[in-house]
């Protein structure tokens, strides 16, 4: 059992710490953020830590609502036993587009731009091709 003495801003933090796509849902206004990580629990905890430490690195829009006193609930959208990083980003993009059709999102891009910058820097031609398909 994990030590739960910290008062988390994000409720429903999952025990699952494998790869997957997650959602942070604002319980006050219904707005959502879609993300993906190879370690879901750790990534959601890092969001929670940044909120509690008043660090805006993860999303200034999320943090603005935290400062207003809004609460958030974490949900696993999809989890995997094993998945490559680029396939995980493809699933994230899929869910951003899917949820974005009927919900207001905190996400400002289909796929975070740091992935594009990273893969351009390492000259991954397959990722660059995939990103071109996602954004077209």
Image (cartoon, rainbow, N blue to C red):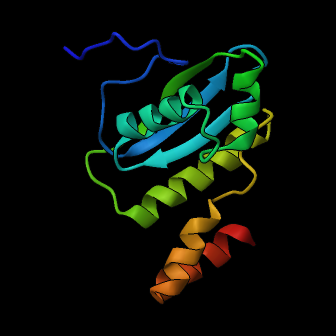
Which residue does the image show at 72% across and 57% down from the upper left? Answer: 109
Q: In which quadrant of the rendered image does the N terminus lie?
A: top left
As drawn, is 11 to the left or to the right of 24?
A: left
As drawn, is 4 to the left or to the right of 112?
A: left
Examine the rendering and report whether any part of residue 22 can be seen: yes
Indicate whether 91 appears above or below 11: below
Q: Residue placed farthest to the front in the image?
A: 53
Rendering coords of residue 29 (x, y %): 79, 18
Indicate whether 92 appears above or below 17: below
Which residue does the image show at 51% across and 75% down from the upper left? Answer: 118
Rendering coords of residue 130 (x, y %): 57, 75
Rendering coords of residue 91 (x, y %): 52, 53
Indicate whether 127 appears above or below 72: below
Which residue does the image show at 65% across and 42% down from the upper left? Answer: 56
- State the residue in front, 125 or 121: 121
Examine the rendering and report whether any part of residue 106 can be seen: no
């Amino acid at each position: 059992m994990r030590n739960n003495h910290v008062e988390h801003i994000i409720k429903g933090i999952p025990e699952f710490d494998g790869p997957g796509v997650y959602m942070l849902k604002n319980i006050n206004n219904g707005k959502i953020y879609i993300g993906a990580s190879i370690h879901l629990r750790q990534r959601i905890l890092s969001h929670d830590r940044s909120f509690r430490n008043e660090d805006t690195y993860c999303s200034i829009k999320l943090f603005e609502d935290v400062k207003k006193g809004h609460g958030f609930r974490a949900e696993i959208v999809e989890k995997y036993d094993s998945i490559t990083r680029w396939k995980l980003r493809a699933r994230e993009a899929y869910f951003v587009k899917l949820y974005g059709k009927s919900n207001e999102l905190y996400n400002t891009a289909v796929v975070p731009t740091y992935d594009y910058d990273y893969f351009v820097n390492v000259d991954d031609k397959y990722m660059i091709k995939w990103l071109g398909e996602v954004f077209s």
